[in-house]
Image (cartoon, helix red, strand yellow):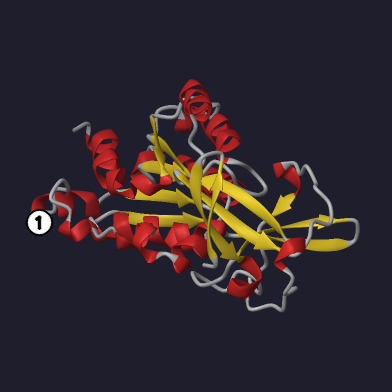
Amino acid sequence: MVGVFSSRDILTPLVDLGGWLGVPTKADLEKKFVIVTDFNRMTNGFLIDSISRIHRISWNDVESPSQFLEAGEQDCVVAVVRKDGNLIMILDFEKIIADINPELSMEKYDVKVDKSVDLNQKMVDKRNAKTVMVVDDSAFIRSLIQDTLSSAGYNIIACKDGGEAHEKLMEIKRVATEENVPVTELVDAVVTDVEMPRMDGMHLLKRLRDTEEYKTIPIMMFSSLMSDDNRSKALSLGANDTITKPEIGKMVTMMDKYIFNY
Protein backbone atom coordinates (compact mmCIF):
# COMPACT_ATOMS: atom_id res chain seq x y z
CA MET A 1 0.00 0.00 0.00
CA VAL A 2 1.68 3.22 -1.15
CA GLY A 3 -0.92 5.78 -0.04
CA VAL A 4 -4.43 7.09 -0.65
CA PHE A 5 -5.97 9.50 -3.16
CA SER A 6 -9.36 11.06 -3.85
CA SER A 7 -11.37 9.48 -6.69
CA ARG A 8 -14.80 11.04 -7.31
CA ASP A 9 -14.80 12.31 -3.73
CA ILE A 10 -14.02 8.83 -2.38
CA LEU A 11 -10.83 8.35 -0.38
CA THR A 12 -9.22 5.45 -2.26
CA PRO A 13 -6.29 3.23 -1.15
CA LEU A 14 -3.48 2.94 -3.71
CA VAL A 15 -1.78 -0.44 -4.13
CA ASP A 16 1.56 -0.91 -5.93
CA LEU A 17 0.51 -3.88 -8.08
CA GLY A 18 4.03 -4.61 -9.30
CA GLY A 19 5.31 -4.53 -5.74
CA TRP A 20 2.68 -7.01 -4.60
CA LEU A 21 3.48 -9.31 -7.54
CA GLY A 22 7.19 -9.02 -6.85
CA VAL A 23 8.09 -7.81 -10.37
CA PRO A 24 10.39 -4.88 -11.23
CA THR A 25 8.60 -1.61 -12.04
CA LYS A 26 9.47 1.90 -13.15
CA ALA A 27 10.56 4.28 -10.40
CA ASP A 28 9.10 7.44 -12.00
CA LEU A 29 5.64 7.83 -10.44
CA GLU A 30 4.79 10.80 -12.67
CA LYS A 31 4.46 8.52 -15.71
CA LYS A 32 2.47 5.73 -14.07
CA PHE A 33 -1.25 4.97 -14.32
CA VAL A 34 -3.88 3.88 -11.82
CA ILE A 35 -6.61 1.30 -12.40
CA VAL A 36 -9.58 2.04 -10.11
CA THR A 37 -11.72 -0.98 -9.20
CA ASP A 38 -15.11 -1.18 -7.49
CA PHE A 39 -16.13 -4.57 -6.12
CA ASN A 40 -17.27 -6.09 -2.82
CA ARG A 41 -18.51 -2.58 -1.90
CA MET A 42 -14.92 -1.34 -1.91
CA THR A 43 -13.05 1.11 -4.16
CA ASN A 44 -9.32 0.49 -4.66
CA GLY A 45 -6.60 1.89 -6.92
CA PHE A 46 -3.82 -0.23 -8.45
CA LEU A 47 -0.63 1.51 -9.57
CA ILE A 48 0.67 0.21 -12.93
CA ASP A 49 3.54 1.18 -15.27
CA SER A 50 1.60 1.52 -18.51
CA ILE A 51 -1.44 0.52 -20.56
CA SER A 52 -0.81 -1.57 -23.66
CA ARG A 53 -4.35 -1.96 -25.01
CA ILE A 54 -7.90 -2.18 -23.75
CA HIS A 55 -9.68 -5.34 -24.89
CA ARG A 56 -13.37 -6.12 -24.62
CA ILE A 57 -13.48 -9.86 -24.02
CA SER A 58 -16.48 -12.19 -24.17
CA TRP A 59 -16.80 -14.66 -21.31
CA ASN A 60 -16.76 -17.35 -23.99
CA ASP A 61 -13.10 -16.44 -24.67
CA VAL A 62 -12.07 -16.57 -21.02
CA GLU A 63 -10.52 -19.87 -19.92
CA SER A 64 -9.88 -21.39 -16.54
CA PRO A 65 -6.17 -21.40 -15.67
CA SER A 66 -4.26 -24.63 -16.07
CA GLN A 67 -3.39 -26.68 -13.02
CA PHE A 68 0.11 -25.25 -13.35
CA LEU A 69 -1.20 -21.70 -12.96
CA GLU A 70 -3.94 -22.39 -10.42
CA ALA A 71 -1.72 -23.73 -7.67
CA GLY A 72 -4.34 -23.23 -4.97
CA GLU A 73 -5.64 -20.63 -2.54
CA GLN A 74 -2.43 -18.58 -2.67
CA ASP A 75 -2.43 -18.20 -6.45
CA CYS A 76 -3.41 -14.81 -7.89
CA VAL A 77 -4.31 -15.90 -11.45
CA VAL A 78 -8.05 -16.46 -11.75
CA ALA A 79 -8.39 -16.95 -15.53
CA VAL A 80 -6.56 -16.65 -18.85
CA VAL A 81 -7.35 -15.27 -22.30
CA ARG A 82 -5.60 -16.14 -25.57
CA LYS A 83 -5.24 -12.96 -27.64
CA ASP A 84 -3.09 -12.21 -30.71
CA GLY A 85 -0.80 -15.14 -29.98
CA ASN A 86 -0.37 -14.13 -26.34
CA LEU A 87 -1.61 -15.73 -23.14
CA ILE A 88 -3.06 -12.97 -20.97
CA MET A 89 -3.40 -13.79 -17.27
CA ILE A 90 -6.33 -12.27 -15.37
CA LEU A 91 -5.49 -11.46 -11.77
CA ASP A 92 -7.66 -12.28 -8.76
CA PHE A 93 -8.01 -8.77 -7.30
CA GLU A 94 -10.20 -10.04 -4.45
CA LYS A 95 -7.31 -12.24 -3.33
CA ILE A 96 -4.85 -9.35 -3.62
CA ILE A 97 -6.97 -6.98 -1.50
CA ALA A 98 -7.60 -9.68 1.10
CA ASP A 99 -3.87 -10.36 1.31
CA ILE A 100 -2.98 -6.68 1.71
CA ASN A 101 -5.77 -5.80 4.13
CA PRO A 102 -6.94 -8.89 6.07
CA GLU A 103 -9.32 -6.71 8.11
CA LEU A 104 -11.50 -6.35 5.00
CA SER A 105 -11.25 -10.01 4.03
CA MET A 106 -14.06 -12.55 4.21
CA GLU A 107 -11.42 -14.79 5.82
CA LYS A 108 -12.21 -13.05 9.12
CA TYR A 109 -15.68 -14.60 9.18
CA ASP A 110 -15.96 -17.70 11.36
CA VAL A 111 -19.29 -19.49 11.25
CA LYS A 112 -18.48 -21.27 14.53
CA VAL A 113 -18.74 -18.00 16.48
CA ASP A 114 -21.74 -16.61 14.56
CA LYS A 115 -24.67 -16.67 16.99
CA SER A 116 -27.16 -16.24 14.13
CA VAL A 117 -26.26 -19.71 12.79
CA ASP A 118 -27.85 -22.76 14.42
CA LEU A 119 -24.94 -25.06 15.28
CA ASN A 120 -26.66 -27.48 17.65
CA GLN A 121 -25.81 -31.11 16.85
CA LYS A 122 -29.30 -31.93 15.56
CA MET A 123 -29.09 -29.16 12.94
CA VAL A 124 -25.50 -30.03 11.99
CA ASP A 125 -26.59 -33.65 11.49
CA LYS A 126 -29.41 -32.48 9.21
CA ARG A 127 -26.93 -30.49 7.13
CA ASN A 128 -24.63 -33.54 7.00
CA ALA A 129 -27.28 -35.21 4.85
CA LYS A 130 -27.29 -32.34 2.32
CA THR A 131 -24.88 -31.49 -0.50
CA VAL A 132 -24.26 -28.02 -1.95
CA MET A 133 -22.43 -27.32 -5.21
CA VAL A 134 -20.12 -24.28 -4.95
CA VAL A 135 -19.11 -22.63 -8.23
CA ASP A 136 -16.45 -19.90 -8.34
CA ASP A 137 -13.43 -19.29 -10.57
CA SER A 138 -11.34 -17.91 -7.69
CA ALA A 139 -9.69 -20.74 -5.73
CA PHE A 140 -9.44 -18.29 -2.81
CA ILE A 141 -13.18 -17.43 -2.74
CA ARG A 142 -14.20 -21.01 -3.53
CA SER A 143 -12.25 -22.23 -0.51
CA LEU A 144 -13.83 -19.60 1.78
CA ILE A 145 -17.36 -20.57 0.75
CA GLN A 146 -16.54 -24.25 1.06
CA ASP A 147 -15.04 -23.81 4.53
CA THR A 148 -18.02 -21.74 5.71
CA LEU A 149 -20.65 -24.23 4.55
CA SER A 150 -18.74 -27.38 5.53
CA SER A 151 -18.05 -25.94 9.02
CA ALA A 152 -21.84 -25.75 9.46
CA GLY A 153 -22.22 -29.37 8.34
CA TYR A 154 -22.94 -29.22 4.60
CA ASN A 155 -21.20 -31.52 2.11
CA ILE A 156 -19.62 -29.67 -0.81
CA ILE A 157 -19.03 -30.29 -4.51
CA ALA A 158 -16.61 -27.60 -5.75
CA CYS A 159 -16.38 -26.40 -9.38
CA LYS A 160 -14.01 -23.80 -10.83
CA ASP A 161 -16.39 -22.39 -13.49
CA GLY A 162 -19.90 -22.63 -14.89
CA GLY A 163 -18.84 -25.08 -17.59
CA GLU A 164 -17.48 -27.59 -15.10
CA ALA A 165 -20.56 -27.14 -12.89
CA HIS A 166 -22.94 -27.77 -15.78
CA GLU A 167 -21.02 -30.90 -16.83
CA LYS A 168 -21.11 -32.30 -13.28
CA LEU A 169 -24.80 -31.48 -12.85
CA MET A 170 -25.67 -33.20 -16.13
CA GLU A 171 -23.71 -36.24 -14.95
CA ILE A 172 -25.61 -36.14 -11.63
CA LYS A 173 -28.88 -36.00 -13.62
CA ARG A 174 -27.81 -39.05 -15.65
CA VAL A 175 -26.91 -41.03 -12.51
CA ALA A 176 -30.17 -40.02 -10.80
CA THR A 177 -32.14 -41.21 -13.83
CA GLU A 178 -30.28 -44.54 -13.91
CA GLU A 179 -30.90 -45.08 -10.20
CA ASN A 180 -34.49 -43.81 -10.45
CA VAL A 181 -34.07 -41.22 -7.72
CA PRO A 182 -34.58 -37.42 -7.76
CA VAL A 183 -31.43 -35.33 -8.31
CA THR A 184 -31.95 -33.89 -4.82
CA GLU A 185 -30.75 -37.24 -3.48
CA LEU A 186 -27.33 -36.29 -4.89
CA VAL A 187 -27.22 -32.47 -4.80
CA ASP A 188 -29.55 -30.16 -2.84
CA ALA A 189 -28.54 -26.62 -3.83
CA VAL A 190 -26.15 -24.55 -5.95
CA VAL A 191 -24.31 -21.35 -5.02
CA THR A 192 -22.56 -19.73 -7.98
CA ASP A 193 -20.51 -16.70 -8.89
CA VAL A 194 -21.67 -14.56 -11.83
CA GLU A 195 -18.44 -13.64 -13.64
CA MET A 196 -16.62 -16.85 -14.65
CA PRO A 197 -14.79 -18.31 -17.65
CA ARG A 198 -16.32 -20.85 -20.06
CA MET A 199 -19.86 -20.33 -18.76
CA ASP A 200 -20.91 -17.43 -16.53
CA GLY A 201 -23.32 -17.79 -13.63
CA MET A 202 -26.31 -16.26 -15.43
CA HIS A 203 -25.92 -18.70 -18.33
CA LEU A 204 -25.54 -21.61 -15.89
CA LEU A 205 -28.68 -20.47 -14.04
CA LYS A 206 -30.71 -20.32 -17.27
CA ARG A 207 -29.46 -23.72 -18.44
CA LEU A 208 -30.43 -25.29 -15.12
CA ARG A 209 -33.89 -23.70 -15.03
CA ASP A 210 -34.43 -25.00 -18.59
CA THR A 211 -33.64 -28.54 -17.37
CA GLU A 212 -36.65 -30.30 -15.85
CA GLU A 213 -34.70 -31.93 -13.03
CA TYR A 214 -33.24 -28.60 -11.86
CA LYS A 215 -36.26 -26.33 -12.25
CA THR A 216 -36.86 -26.07 -8.50
CA ILE A 217 -33.45 -26.75 -6.94
CA PRO A 218 -32.34 -23.79 -4.74
CA ILE A 219 -29.82 -21.62 -6.63
CA MET A 220 -28.08 -18.65 -4.99
CA MET A 221 -25.91 -16.11 -6.83
CA PHE A 222 -22.84 -14.92 -4.91
CA SER A 223 -20.96 -12.11 -6.64
CA SER A 224 -18.64 -9.18 -6.00
CA LEU A 225 -20.64 -7.19 -8.58
CA MET A 226 -24.21 -7.81 -7.44
CA SER A 227 -25.70 -4.54 -8.63
CA ASP A 228 -29.46 -3.92 -8.60
CA ASP A 229 -29.54 -4.75 -12.33
CA ASN A 230 -27.63 -8.00 -11.80
CA ARG A 231 -29.89 -8.96 -8.92
CA SER A 232 -33.03 -8.26 -10.98
CA LYS A 233 -31.66 -10.29 -13.89
CA ALA A 234 -30.70 -13.21 -11.64
CA LEU A 235 -34.13 -13.28 -10.00
CA SER A 236 -35.88 -13.04 -13.37
CA LEU A 237 -33.88 -16.03 -14.62
CA GLY A 238 -34.98 -18.07 -11.61
CA ALA A 239 -32.39 -17.54 -8.87
CA ASN A 240 -33.84 -17.98 -5.39
CA ASP A 241 -31.67 -15.23 -3.91
CA THR A 242 -28.44 -13.24 -4.29
CA ILE A 243 -25.58 -12.31 -1.95
CA THR A 244 -22.81 -9.75 -2.36
CA LYS A 245 -19.46 -11.31 -1.55
CA PRO A 246 -18.71 -9.40 1.67
CA GLU A 247 -21.92 -10.89 3.08
CA ILE A 248 -20.56 -14.43 3.42
CA GLY A 249 -22.02 -14.42 6.94
CA LYS A 250 -25.48 -14.79 5.39
CA MET A 251 -24.50 -17.91 3.43
CA VAL A 252 -25.43 -20.64 5.94
CA THR A 253 -28.73 -19.13 7.10
CA MET A 254 -29.75 -18.50 3.48
CA MET A 255 -28.89 -22.10 2.55
CA ASP A 256 -30.89 -23.36 5.54
CA LYS A 257 -33.85 -21.21 4.46
CA TYR A 258 -34.09 -22.66 0.96
CA ILE A 259 -33.05 -26.25 1.67
CA PHE A 260 -35.09 -26.77 4.86
CA ASN A 261 -37.77 -24.10 4.23
CA TYR A 262 -36.91 -22.32 7.50
**Percent from the top left, x then y, of residue 111?**
23, 56
Would you identify the image quadrant in which residue 85 lies? bottom right
**Residue 181 in sight in this render:** no
Q: In the picture shown, does residue 61 fall above or below 226? A: below
Q: In the picture shown, does residue 110 fall above or below 37? A: below
Number of numbered markers: 1
**Percent from the top left, x then y, of residue 194?**
54, 41
Pick whichever, 215 or 227, lies toward us.
Answer: 227
The answer to whether 128 appears left or right of 174 in the picture is left
Pick whichever, 257 or 90, lies toward us.
Answer: 90
The answer to whether 63 appears left or right of 138 in the picture is right
Hey, which residue is sitting farthest right in the picture? Answer: 84
**Residue 34 in sight in this render:** yes
**Percent from the top left, x then y, of residue 223?**
48, 43
Disc 1 residue crowd, few under 14, some 14–19, many 20+, Cα 10 Å: few
Residue pictured at 38% horizontal, 29% vertical: 240
Q: In the picture shown, does residue 261 fall above or below 40? A: above
Would you identify the image quadrant in which residue 170 lies? top right
The answer to whether 57 appears left or right of 240 in the picture is right
Residue pictured at 37% horizontal, 34% vertical: 218
Residue, disc 1: 121
Residue pictured at 72% horizontal, 74% vertical: 27
**Percent from the top left, x then y, of residue 119?**
13, 53
Pick whichever, 227 or 192, lies toward us.
Answer: 227
Pick whichever, 220 or 46, lies toward us.
Answer: 46
Secondary structure state at the residue bearing disc 1: helix
Q: Identify the amino acid type marked 1.
A: Gln
Quarter of the image where the C terminus is located: top left
The answer to whether 220 appears left or right of 97 in the picture is left
Residue pictured at 70% horizontal, 62% vertical: 48
